Image: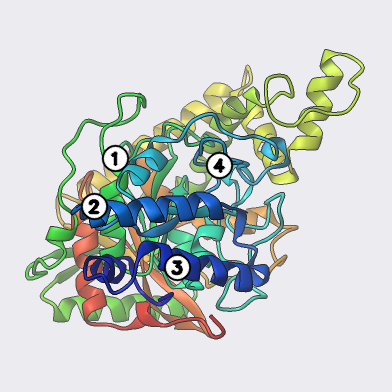
Amino acid sequence: MHQLTLAEIARGLADKKFSSEELTKVLLARIAQLDPQLNSFISLTEDLALQQAKAADARRANGESGALLGAPIAHKDLFCTQGIRTSCGSKMLDNFKAPYDATVVAKLAAAGAVTLGKTNMDEFAMGSANESSYYGAVKNPWNLECVPGGSSGGSAAAVAARLLPAATATDTGGSIRQPAAFTNLTGLKPTYGRVSRWGMIAYASSLDQGGPLARTAEDCAILLQGMAGFDPQDSTSIDEPVPDYSAGLNGSLQGLRIGVPKEYFSAGLDPRIADLVMASVEELKKLGAVVKEISLPNMQHAIPAYYVIAPAEASSNLSRFDGVRFGYRCEDPKNLEDLYKRSRGEGFGPEVQRRIMVGAYALSAGYYDAYYLKAQKIRRLIKNDFMAAFNEVDIILGPTTPNPAWKLGAKNNDPVSEYLEDVYTITANLAGLPGLSMPAGFVDGLPVGVQLLAPYFQEGRLLNVAHQYQQNTDWHTRTPTGF
């Protein structure tokens, strides 16, 4: 049962081949057996899962149907879940139980999804390796000595190891797509505003976006269908109709115009990944796509702009964690200043402290115009590059990451080299565009992803291209040894 995709689970439940309760028990036992190797979960919710599974079975018995009704999933541990610890991977929120459900959690629960638990993540979603978590690093099931990517590494490792079919995740600079690439999954970052951020603990509010992680584009379509939609509680949510993503998966790619940016193939890209990217281009050409070279001239400025904007927003968002209202509080503070200093110093890990300091500096008097304002101007230039490119092509294709997954601890003393691993993903967040990573091969036994980008609200186009590619390749069906 653990090898079934979301789509296969939906068909199995509809055909009464098994019940949601049976499936849930199998997966909970599998998590208990195998997750100690991976550390992909922070909290397990066995009682809630069995309760939801029984309720889903009862709804099906009463004639209800739905692709997510009775389907087991997990939530990245920054989606608030009522009465369940929502830690954000931080000591600061280790004792925090949210008093409400995030909109994404509530929507998926209403659709009948079964929550198995909350997955491990980089602290406050800051990192590309899932090594900054207060609960310890997550291991990559393809090689337990390697990182699974971050910050959604717990969701990615759990799905890749077949502990569950799909999970929610979030993407601020590539945190869905990069772990998907490192663990041989399909991961989708929707258009900014497509999925509600209400109840999603913020890192950088103008960049964060929730989305699905699964093994196939078909499964991502099912999960995104349950997550997407306008939310009046979220001021950044966009009131745009949600199409039937599954219905568009089988469209022909005949005449589809694919742009391949020349800037992607620089000295920083592993040549073996470049070869796999071009092999995926050839596969799509066989399906009728037309390929042309394009240019994104301001891409070189993306990383410096992102690492001014994101820390600036983080320093503002994380100011609420002060040891006063909720979360971690230091022992025996001498006065209010001591309470603030020690609560934050002890509650936040080194990477979070680093980004808060950078952000506070960028927003300080005398530096705001020089750094933050300039970064926002560069952000606009990057968006303009994409708008010009999408006048010529329908989607943009390239590598998801410049390198395969690295060894645990390899970049701990060189944060900048870790930041550079986001070079291909962060432009989509800066511009607010939808992006998808799909499995495209292996380098030294480690998975490699290819990234697709599309115009605003064209998630369906990304899913269609990825699904057609997956109908003609088998990379996404490979399973890590031992899982």
The kind of residue tagged 4 is Tyr
- Is 285 on the left or on the right of 10, as rendered? left
Q: Check disc 3 and give the amino acid type.
A: Ala
Asked if the residue at tag 1 contacts the one at tag 4, i.e. Cβ–Cβ closer than 8 Å, the answer is no
Give the residue at mark 2. 459
- Work out whether residue 453 can be spotted: no
Q: Which residue is mark 3?
A: 181
Query: Mark 4 or mark 3, which is nearer to you?
Result: 3
> Which label sits on residue 194?
1
Q: Please give the name of the residue rendered at 62% of the width and 73% of the height, measured from the top-left corner.
A: 33
| Above-or-below relation of 182 to 111 | below
Residue 74 image label: none
Residue nearest the viewer, comparing 262 with 140: 140
The tag earlier along the polypeptide, 2 or 4, is 4
Residue 185 % position (x, y): 41, 69
Amino acid identity at mark 2: Glu
Q: Nearer the viewer, mark 4 or mark 1?
A: 1
- Work out how far the residue at label 3 is from the one at label 2, CA to CA, in angstroms: 18 Å
